[in-house]
Amino acid sequence: MKRGKKNSDAGDPVTKSDTRTGSSELDAARPSLSSMKSMGLLLAVLMVASVMFSLSVVLRDPPSDDVVESDASSRVLQIRFHQAMDSDGGLSEKKEKEKLGNINVPRFDKESCLSRYEASLYRKESPFKQSSYLDHRLQRYEDLHRLCGPFTRSYNLTLDKLKSGDRSDGGVSDCRYVIWLNSNGELGNRMLSLASAFLYALLTNRVLLVEPGVDMADLFCEPFPNTSWFLPVEFPLKNQHNGFDEQSLLRDSGNTMFAYRHLVRDSTDQQKLFFCEKSQVLLEETSWLIMKAENYFVPSLFSISSFQQELRKLFPEKETVFYFLSQYLYHPTNVVWGLITRYYSAYLARADQRIGIHIGVSDTGNDRYQHLVEQILACGIRHKLLPEVDKQRHLPSSQVLNRKSRAVFISSSSPGYFESIRDIYWENPTVTGEIISVHKPSNKEYQKTQRNMENRRAWTEIYLLSCADVLVVTSSWSSLVDVAYGHGGLKPWVLINAENGTGHDPHCIRARSMEPCSQTPRFHGCKD
Ligand SMILES: *[C@@H]1O[C@H](CO)[C@@H](O)[C@H](O)[C@H]1NC(C)=O
Ligand SMILES: *[C@@H]1O[C@H](CO)[C@@H](O)[C@H](O)[C@H]1NC(C)=O
Ligand SMILES: *[C@@H]1O[C@H](CO)[C@@H](O)[C@H](O)[C@H]1NC(C)=O
């Protein structure tokens, strides 16, 4: 999908460099007289490149046997590449196509959502590959959404039937919808539940419409080309305050044109039965399914037997479900992308490695707090994510030959942890001589001031964490963390017993999956 990487090129330079574009250019040039000229040019370019390469090898820092380093420095190169391209007026269309594989780039207006085009410059190449069947189904979904999206002919017809209650043709229309109600709750939960709702729409050939709420349009680009996923404001089932009223939705659910389902733990029996085969069959007739959910209910979809075969085809690797859905759906808007890229460029881009730490425990209670800082460092040192500090030697870093650096990015609502960890790496040199910089983007006080800014910052933190090379988290029970590692395709290190401060060796364990793990399917009470 993305540019070839150095490892894969190592084997046979002749065949490997014979990429599609390269060979076609050469083919075209061969029969003409200008071939001599282009060969000459090519040679010159190759010579300059090899000189540059040797120079860069000579001028580089002392060699290191650390595998991480080569990976990271290649990404630094990517960033430089990106900056260079930017000053040239942006990436060329060809480069974009190469980078994005079979996502048909021209279907989107580039300027309206830069993150869609630039995201791959900020993270490692993914080891996971989307199944071609998922590609195909997403393409089909996009076609359906364009056909049935807001204010299309089909949408207007289906809506007219809902308004008039006209069931003369059985009330069934070509387009069926699932409307995702926005709880305006915690951003992580909303992202998890919306991704689940989209998968449900994909499985049932429905069109997903999103209640925008106060901030969805501010945070996320439109994911589907040439249409909108937002529910129009004039949708009839809303009350006079332009919101959905749960009580009246429940009351009117006798209307067979729409159904309302609230998918939470404490919902009524009728609502719970949603994940039963029978309910799914009944709902097939319903044009408008209105859904309220605040959790990741993909595991429950896997429990519905009629979906299982399709799910296996879509996601041969089960743990990649959220990763692919969120990479597909969630592109930061330009305003959020500005927050992400400015922060990244200022604090993280120059480091050879990026370590994300999410601390979901508040720093009240001095003992526990100090204990947790120690536990984080012990975990990092044990698993070689962070270097040890040397409290004996006081060698100024100008005397140290190792110029490697790591950036630690801390997401936490309490500033204390950040200050502690920063001070440890400021006051003491590391045994390896590496420079550790410690950063933290937001703090609580600021968050309180502006509602809008709060979720932009939350999305920024999720995104920056997802760009880390390694992730350490105090618990996997936070939806923000779930989304961060799921979106990044990372398996985090999870501290053991961080909440009650009793953690000891082993201080942390590697999560087994990158799928949001706090959510296992529950007993749904189905009677088959
Ligand atoms: C659908 O209805 C809206 C207004 O209700 C109208 O503006 C739009 O043109 C209609 N779409 C089509 C394709 O007729
Ligand atoms: C999508 O819209 C853009 C501009 O609005 C247009 O140039 C393009 O042809 C459209 N693509 C499709 C597939 O309709
Ligand atoms: C801390 O939590 C762990 C697991 O949740 C538990 O086993 C342990 O007993 C707790 N310790 C204290 C002191 O509460």
Image (cartoon, rainbow, N blue to C red):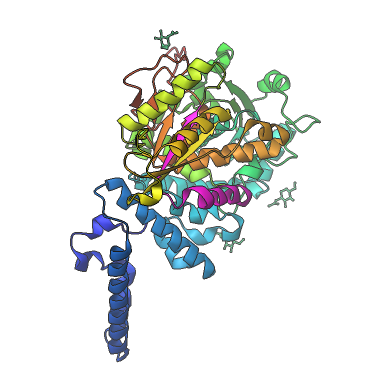
Q: Residue at x 43, y 56 (%)?
A: 100
Which quarter of the image is occupied by the N terminus?
Answer: bottom left
- Kindly indicate the quadrant of the structure image that contains residue 495: top left
Reply above or below: 122 against 159: below
Reply above or below: 212 against 143: above
Along the line of sight, which residue is nearer the eye, 35 or 411?
Answer: 411
Q: Total number of numbered labels?
A: 0
Q: Is any atom of residue 9 visible in this view?
A: yes
Which quarter of the image is occupied by the C terminus?
Answer: top left
Picture coordinates of residue 118, whole percent (x, y): 49, 55
Residue numbers of the magenta segment: 333-359
Q: Residue at x 66, y 44 (%)?
A: 218
Picture coordinates of residue 220, whole percent (x, y): 59, 44
Q: Judge whether residue 351 is colored magenta.
A: yes
Along the line of sight, which residue is nearer the eye, 63 or 506?
Answer: 63
Q: Residue at x 66, y 34 (%)?
A: 447
Q: Residue at x 18, y 59 (%)?
A: 11
Q: Judge whether residue 207 is colored magenta.
A: no
Along the line of sight, which residue is nearer the eye, 472 or 65?
Answer: 65
- Kindly indicate the quadrant of the structure image that contains residue 433: top left
